[in-house]
Image (cartoon, coloured by chain):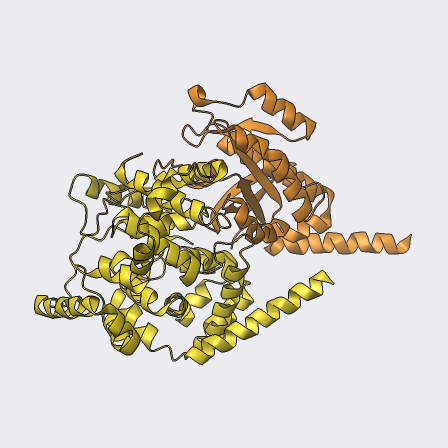
Chain colours: A yellow, B orange
Amino acid sequence: MSLQKSLKSVSGEQDTTSICSSVTTQPDRHGFFGGAQYSPEPKRTVSPSTILKREQKWLRMLNNWEAFMSKNYKKVRERCRKGIPASVRPKAWLYLCGGQLLLEKHPNEYEELLQAPGDPKCMEDIRKDLHRQFPYHEMFIREEGHGQQELFSVLKAYSVLNPKVGYFQAQAPVAAFLLMHMPSVQAFWCLVSISDKYLSGYYNPGLEVLQRDGDILHALLRRTAPAVHRHLVKHRVEPVLYATEWFLCALTRTLPWDSLLRVWDCFLCEGVKVLFKASLVVLAGALGPAKVRKRANGLCETLEVLRHPPDSVLGEEYLMYHMQRLNLTEEDFEFEHQRQTARRRAMANRSGS
Amino acid sequence: MDYDYLIKLLCVGDSGVGKTSFLYKYTDGVFHTQFISTVGIDFREKTVIYQQNGRQHRIHLQLWDTAGQERFRSLTTAFYRDAMGFLLLFDLTNEASFLEVRNWIEQLKTHSLSDDPDIVLCGHKCDLQEKRLVNPNRAREFAKNYNLPYLETSAKTGQNIDRAIEILLDKVMFRMETSVEYAMLCATGRRRQSLQKLQAKQDRKFCSC
């Protein structure tokens, strides 16, 4: 369920105020003129001197990237968990996800891919979605503006590079999000890495990997928040109903901006399990209180709660703190992965025979 | 939960035909010019009063919104089974979306509970007259062949939005009237109890003959 969309639905009035209050003023510090992602108050959780120190550490690390990643990955991870300073974030993301390596290996490929005609059906699907990504962001607010053109290029290039996936609608918000941080050629190689490695299989026809991961999330929830798990089972709230957009769009449409940036700092360092952890924290935070579960005594009521988790649960400090306290090991993830894969295979065999 | 029936309707059609806008207009009365594409499944709700044979029913509508791109069908078709009726939309300014309607009907027939599901076909975005690519007669002819009600709708002007849902609701309610079993799927509270009694009475009748 998307927050951006549903916030508008609370009431028409609320929506207009959020737009009006921002249309006449400057965009917020992330470039939003309105909508659910608009966050006017400036963030001051880390002191300027700490930021300065972190920037220097990051610059040193980026200059010795290979060495750090191979010998001191834990250090990199720790620094990602603390949050990457905004000034180095774009470069850090490019290095973390391997986009930089891809770019060095194929320096001219992006331009070449753009020369190709592209599959007409893909091109049409992409065009239909260009004005439907972060419509309140300064880059994408203007129909056929610069941002939307770049978005087209990035998505087109990917569809030509990987015709098996072509274009999938969930890629558009991810690509748009990347474009807010870096030039299109870099955004493209990050998208390649995210689509093919981080979220490998998510965008393939059939969406089986997504459905399996939904089951894994559900199984992990049983360990981390058994009462919430029971509630979801009781009201038949399947993961596909609430987690599809969370996973497919890597939370870009789900979290408030500051939280999203922090989660992505970790996601690009540690991989897809970060999305699981964030989802588990949101689920437990939103449906944890017994009185909330009691009130949400049905499928739609529960989905409604998950559409609008309380701000406190989505806040960056709360989210990051509880993600690290989840008490899930690498082995737990691996175990559930094996189990759900086997289960799905058995199911497929049964229905096949 | 103060209503007699809970009815689930599902909105389908190609990507970008305006499903989300249609449902927003219906439930909130608002047309948003700025929108995000639907990824996965979403829903809207509205409670309406329905008159039938001089009786008033309070009906709670659950309107399920689905992503249009073909790749999502492996997720969305699972929900066709739970829906009582379907809004099938195409975009009057997009020929391809009209050509896909046939395909959508097949999908609905395959995956819904009934072989002959209740569907209302809507040619959407009819406010964009200068961009129209699907001739009204052609769409009407097509709908007639499939025995579907056809309406031209616009979320911008609101034209026929309520009407389309009303027609679909008529079809669903008619089906319920003719089948207690079917009605039981949607009835809640006291309405459910009275239907249960009715069903028990019918069963007894069958026993005696």
Is A295 left or right of B198, judged from the image as shown? left
Quadrant of the image containing the N terminus of chain A = bottom left
Q: Is residue A141 above or below residue A310?
A: above
Residue beneath the point at 60% across and 34% down: B101
Q: Position of residue A265 (x, y in %)?
A: 28, 65
Q: Position of residue B41 (x, y in %)?
A: 49, 51
Q: Is residue A120 visible?
A: yes
Query: Seen in the image, is A173 located left or right of residue A118?
Result: left
Residue at 36% across, 61% down: A309
Quarter-wise, where is residue A312 in the image? bottom left
Q: Is residue A29 above or below residue A319?
A: above
In the image, taking residue A265 as reference, residue A205 lies left or right, namely: right
Location of the C terminus of chain A by quadrant is bottom right
At 28% from the left and 41% from the top, the residue drawn is: A147
Which of A329/B115 is in front? A329
The residue positioned farthest toward the right in the image shown: B209
Residue nearest the observer in this picture, A38 or B165: A38
Q: How many marks?
A: 0
Q: Is residue A259 above or below residue B135?
A: below
Instruction: Let me know if residue A253 appears in the view.
Output: no
The answer to which of A198 and A12 lies nearer the viewer is A198
Counting from the top left corner in percent of width and height, residue B155 is at 44, 32
Q: Residue A260 placed where, x, y %?
A: 30, 60
